[in-house]
Amino acid sequence: MITAGQVRAARALLGLDQRQLAELSGLSLPTIQRMEASDGVIRGNVDSLMKLVNALTAAGVELIGDGIASGRGVRLAIRASEP
């Protein structure tokens, strides 16, 4: 599960606009806009959600779920070349 806030935060960390995220994920701009306008957890087509999550992960963002640390969020992933 991913929230609209996590998508917006991930985009901000990566310096992407909605159009760029749409291109990276293979989704349409209106789909990204609709997902970010959602209230809380994004609901929708599982395939679209997986494309979004996979694109964010590939771009270097780690999604943090409930129950880990202090709750939902995002952070830049640690790359293998980093200490």
Image (cartoon, rainbow, N blue to C red):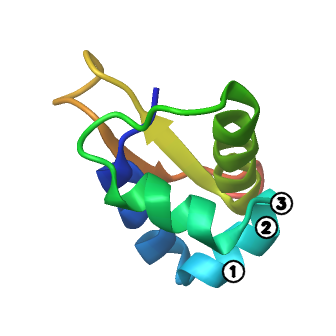
Q: CA distance from mark 1 to mark 2?
A: 6 Å
Residue hosting label 1: 20
Residue hosting label 3: 26
Image position of 63 with respect to 26: above or below: above
The answer to whether marks 1 and 2 mark residues whose Cβ atoms lie closer than 8 Å is yes
Which residue is depicted at the point 70% across and 53% down? Answer: 79
Residue 30 image point, x, y percent: 59, 69
Image position of 60 with respect to 17: above or below: above
Which class describes the residues within 10 Å of circle 3: few (<14), some (14-19), or many (20+)? few
Residue 3 image point, x, y percent: 36, 41
As shown in the figure, which amino acid type bears the numbered disc 1? Gln
Image position of 46 with respect to 74: above or below: above
Single out the residue that lies furthest toward the left.
70
Residue hosting label 2: 24
Q: CA distance from mark 3 to mark 2?
A: 6 Å
Which residue is depicted at the point 75% across and 59% down? Answer: 27
